[in-house]
Amino acid sequence: MTRHVVIIDDSDIDLKVLSAAIDACGMRASVFCNGIDANEVLFGEAVDLIILDVEMPFVHGTVKARILKEHPDTKDIPLLLISGKSAAEMQTLSEECGADGYITKPISRQHLCNTLRQFFADDQAASDNATSC
């Protein structure tokens, strides 16, 4: 099964870098330049993980994260914030808005792949435990 990752970032360059990295990891990426345009996919398709930029037009990334984490259709989808802010700032923002983690820019393809695989491995382990009872 190919994992589906939704990327929401207002930078065309970052969207291309993230999308290429996700493709190289053997996953499918859907890219959006703002959180509003992503709604149709987020609420209408199977999504395995969301990568959301913090500094976004229209709806700030942390606000969008809170909305997604409170909505019954998206609350269980892992959500990673992404930003050029420091790791300490990102940790605080992630905790405040309910994100499952964060990635700091600049983006390393290997780090991104490892992070995504870790989320999916955790998901698989939880599924295995649920079916082994």
Image (cartoon, grey):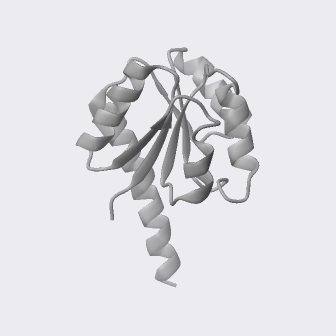
Kindly identify the residue that appears in the image at 29 percent across and 30 percent down.
Answer: 109
Quadrant of res 66: top right
Kindly identify the residue that appears in the image at 52 percent across and 22 percent down.
Answer: 10
Callout count: 0
Q: Where is residue 26 in the image (x, y as percent from the top left)?
A: 26, 49
Q: Where is residue 67 in the image (x, y as percent from the top left)?
A: 74, 42
Single out the residue that lies furthest toward the top. Answer: 85
Q: In this view, does 4 lie above or below 32?
A: below
In this rendering, would 51 be left or right of 73? left
Foreground of the two, 96 or 42: 42
Q: Position of residue 122 (x, y in %)?
A: 45, 57
Quadrant of res 124: bottom left
Kindly identify the residue that appears in the image at 65 percent across and 36 percent down.
Answer: 36
Q: Position of residue 118 (x, y in %)?
A: 40, 48
Single out the residue that lies furthest toward the bottom. Answer: 133
Kindly identify the residue that appears in the image at 62 percent across and 35 percent down.
Answer: 35
In this rendering, would 19 be left or right of 37? left
Q: In which quarter of the image is the N terminus?
A: bottom left
Foreground of the two, 33 or 49: 33
Q: In this view, does 69 lie above or below 37?
A: below
Foreground of the two, 32 or 122: 32
